[in-house]
Image: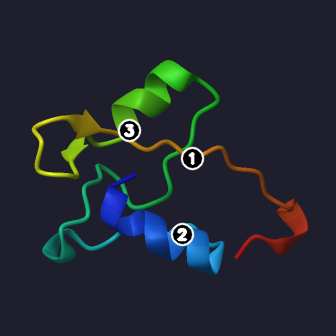
């Protein structure tokens, strides 16, 4: 995910689909992209400079869900 989305995910506990390219969402097909492979998760995570020091950081989430509560 992008770092800017992390605060909303952590505070709400909800991961919403990327579905609006006009808002800067980056996707091929609308949805939430998940994988059990850390190498693929690394590709999904977008590197960003956070502290103005030129170092790039990525964030990957470990998710679990209750199938009876899916929206």
Tag 2–tag 1 contact (CB < 8 Å): yes
List x then y, in percent, for residue 38.
54, 24
Task: Please report the residue visible at 20 percent of the width from the left and 52 percent of the height from the top.
Answer: 51
The residue at the point 47 percent across, 19 percent down is 39
Judge left or right: residue 6 versus residue 58: right
Q: Position of residue 63 (x, y in %)?
A: 69, 49
Q: Which of pointers 2 and 3 indicates the residue nearer the eye?
A: 2
Instruction: Please tell me which of labels 2 and 1 falls first in the chain.
Output: 2
Check disc 2 and report its element: helix, strand or loop. helix
Which residue occupies 14% across, 76% down?
22
Q: Is residue 18 visible?
A: no
Foreground mark, 3 or 1, reads 1
Residue at the spot of label 3: 44
Q: CA distance from mark 3 to mark 1?
A: 10 Å
Residue 57 or residue 61, whichever sits in front: 57
Tag 3–tag 1 contact (CB < 8 Å): no
Q: What residue did someone put label 1 on?
A: 61
At which x and y percent is residue 17? 46, 66
Residue nearer the viewer, 47 or 16: 47
Q: Nearer the viewer, residue 70 or 24?
A: 24
Q: Earlier in the sequence, mark 3 or mark 1?
A: 3
Q: Secondary structure at mark 1?
A: loop
Q: Secondary structure at mark 3?
A: helix
Query: Disc number at residue 32?
Result: none
Whichever of callouts 2 and 3 sits on the residue coming sooner in the sequence is 2
Dot 1: few (<14), some (14–19), or many (≥20) neighbours within 10 Å?
Answer: few
- Tell me the number on the disc at residue 9: 2
Where 4 sits versus 11, above or below? above
- Mark 2–mark 3 distance (CA, rounded to whole Å): 16 Å
């Amino acid at each position: 995910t992008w770092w800017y989305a992390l605060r909303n995910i952590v505070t709400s506990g909800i991961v919403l689909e990327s579905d609006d390219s006009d808002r800067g969402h980056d996707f091929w097909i609308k949805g939430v992209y998940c994988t059990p492979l850390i190498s693929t998760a690394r590709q999904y995570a977008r590197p960003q400079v956070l502290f103005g020091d030129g170092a790039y950081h990525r964030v990957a989430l470990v998710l679990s869900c209750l199938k009876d509560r899916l929206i």
